[in-house]
Image (spheres, grey):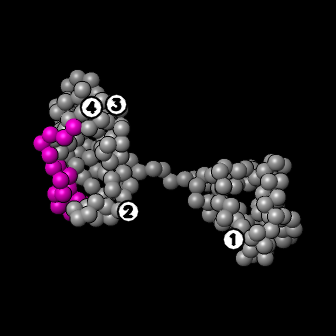
Amino acid sequence: MAPPKTIVDKIVYAIRQQPAASANGVSRAAIVKYLSAEFGVDKTKAASKKAFKDGVSKGILIQTGQSFRVKGDTVPEVSEEPKVVIEELKEGKGPPAQSGDTVTVKYEGKLTDGTIFDSAKSFEFTLGAGEVIKGWDQGIAGMKVGGKRKLFVPSKLGYGKRGAAPEIPPNADLQFEVKLKSIQ
């Protein structure tokens, strides 16, 4: 294959040589850095800015925000967002809890090593309003009063990289046993 000649060709080459971080493609910053390292293209040069614009207007590139991909190339598969694993321990009665409902639960939270980090006999919150970790909003939705579930919450849907010191370390997966007491 002949080396790319135009700056647009070099941008296409740079995009295809780098793994995309998302389905949107490769960031402008990563492409410019590659162009500078591999082809000596000046990072501040107006010609590279114009080349991005030309690539998009000619239909060669697809721009989403500050990321680019080559039209016609397969879109990279983006890993699926983590989900809560739900183990139904007891089915409740009545209508299921849904986003916007005020729910009251009894719960016990544990780390994967079995250490209990929190529990409450009665805790009230609005489902789906971001008042609790995402894992609870996902895992409690659909429960019926009197129902009991075990929730296995991946770190990303719990406290993530920051954790919740001192009880919950960074990147900790969590387990909860939850009983739905009421829906309002």
Q: Quadrant of the N terminus?
A: bottom right
Residue 8 point in image, percent of width and height: 82, 61
The residue that appears at 16% across and 57% down in the rendered structure is 116
Question: Which circle's residue, 3 or 1, is located before the other in the chain?
Answer: 1
Query: Could you say whether the residue bearing mark 3 is in a helix, strand or loop?
Result: loop
State which region is magenta: 108-124
Badge 4 amino acid? Thr
Residue 3 point in image, percent of width and height: 84, 71
Residue topped by disc 1 = 33
Badge 3 amino acid? Gly
Residue topped by disc 4 = 102
Mark 3–mark 1 distance (CA, rounded to whole Å)? 46 Å
Mark 4–mark 1 distance (CA, rounded to whole Å)? 50 Å
Mark 1–mark 2 distance (CA, rounded to whole Å)? 28 Å
Residue topped by disc 2 = 161
Mark 4–mark 3 distance (CA, rounded to whole Å)? 7 Å
Question: Which circle's residue, 4 or 1, is located before the other in the chain?
Answer: 1
